Image (cartoon, helix red, strand yellow):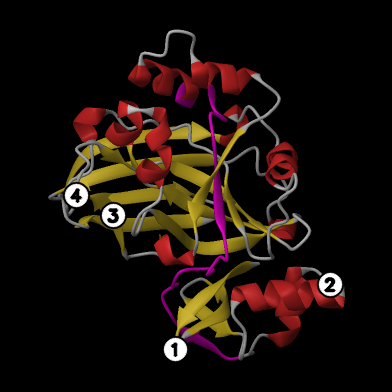
């Protein structure tokens, strides 16, 4: 099932079938997750029962308003190597994390910093090297179970983290730093998430500035491991989104500029496209 949300007077859950959507009256996606768990049914079962039979043409809006967003790093070897090179880390602190049992997990924010398809992603005004980080994202139930998958852009101010690793929160958490969409594919409809081909492009004035790809087969960690560490002494609420790390590295000469268009794609999920704009003011 391709589940997401449409804009009416507010955001409303909907089942997407091609260009058409069948609304789920009275529910957001988070509310559907909660109801399905209360009933002991799968998200697909509950949604199927509650969804309207009438389809209308709608563009997908932000597919979920997550109470929390968390993210993982160094889950692909290329990412760990790049980050060590950026920092000139003598002993390779990112390679160290890549090779240890405990993964890197950090707080990415709440719904306040999230945007959906077609909305603007943010470039901090005090950053000179902001880049997209294309990722497969897990949508979690109240017990940490995976209820669905979507695409995410973990937009990051690389130069700020590069200056000092302790600046990571400022690099990662700010207005419009996380894009989600276009839809959520329910877990029962995506049997092997480790065989997905992800691509990312950046265009400027209709000219391609960057193109990259990676297979989720290159992931170094299993999703169950990432979730288990996330939830150690940290029970996350239903509808939490967990970003699983990036294996597509954007170089500094392709750093985002206002007006750039980023498109992330996995055929089984769809395309997430956003344009970039400056947020905040440089002091």
Name of the residue lying farthest toward the top: 90
Residue 174 is left or right of residue 110, and the answer is left
Residues at marks 3 and 4, CA–CA distance in whole angstroms = 9 Å
- Name the residue: 50% across, 18% down: 93
Residues at marks 2 and 1, CA–CA distance in whole angstroms = 27 Å
Callout 3: SS = strand
What residue range appears in magenta? Answer: 54-79
Q: Of circles 3 and 4, which is in front? A: 4
Callout 4: SS = loop
Q: Of circles 3 and 2, which is in front? A: 3
- Name the residue: 75% across, 63% down: 142
Q: Mark 2 highlights which residue?
A: 41
Q: Mark 3 highlights which residue?
A: 122
Q: Mark 4 highlights which residue?
A: 125
The quadrant in which residue 158 appears is top left
- Name the residue: 36% across, 19% down: 87
Mark 3: few, some, or many residues within 10 Å (few <14, many ≥20)?
A: many
Between 142 and 166, the one lying in front of the other is 166
Q: Are marks 1 and 4 in contact (CB under 8 Å)?
A: no
Upstream in the sequence, badge 2 or badge 1?
1
Measured along the vertical axis of the image, is residue 178 above or below residue 116? above
Mark 1: few, some, or many residues within 10 Å (few <14, many ≥20)?
A: few
Upstream in the sequence, badge 3 or badge 1?
1
Residue 217 is left or right of residue 206, and the answer is right
Residues at marks 3 and 1, CA–CA distance in whole angstroms = 25 Å
């Amino acid at each position: 099932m391709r589940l997401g949300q449409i804009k009416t007077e507010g955001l409303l859950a909907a089942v997407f079938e091609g260009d058409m959507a069948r609304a789920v009256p009275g529910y957001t996606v988070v509310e559907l997750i909660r109801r399905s768990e209360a009933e002991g049914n799968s998200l697909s079962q509950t949604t199927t029962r509650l969804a309207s039979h009438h389809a209308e043409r709608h563009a997908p809006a932000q597919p979920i308003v997550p109470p929390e967003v968390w993210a993982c790093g160094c889950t692909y070897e290329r990412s760990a190597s790049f980050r060590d090179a950026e920092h000139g880390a003598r002993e390779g602190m990112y390679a160290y994390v890549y090779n240890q049992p405990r993964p890197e997990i950090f707080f990415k924010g709440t719904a306040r910093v999230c945007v959906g398809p077609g909305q603007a992603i943010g470039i901090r005004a005090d950053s000179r090297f902001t880049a997209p980080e294309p990722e497969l994202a897990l949508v979690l139930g109240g017990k940490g179970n995976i209820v669905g998958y979507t695409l995410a852009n973990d937009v990051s101010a690389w130069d700020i983290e590069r200056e000092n690793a302790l600046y990571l929160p400022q690099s990662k958490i700010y207005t419009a730093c996380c894009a989600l969409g276009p839809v959520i594919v329910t877990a029962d409809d995506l049997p092997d998430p480790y065989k997905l081909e992800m691509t990312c492009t950046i265009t400027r004035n209709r000219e391609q500035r960057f193109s990259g790809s990676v297979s989720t087969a290159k992931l170094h960690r299993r999703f169950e491991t990432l979730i288990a560490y996330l939830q150690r002494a940290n029970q996350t609420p239903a509808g939490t989104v967990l970003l699983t790390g990036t294996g597509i590295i954007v170089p500094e000469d392709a750093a985002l500029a206002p007006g750039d268009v980023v498109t992330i794609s996995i055929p089984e999920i769809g395309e997430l496209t956003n344009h970039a704009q400056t947020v905040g003011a440089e002091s």
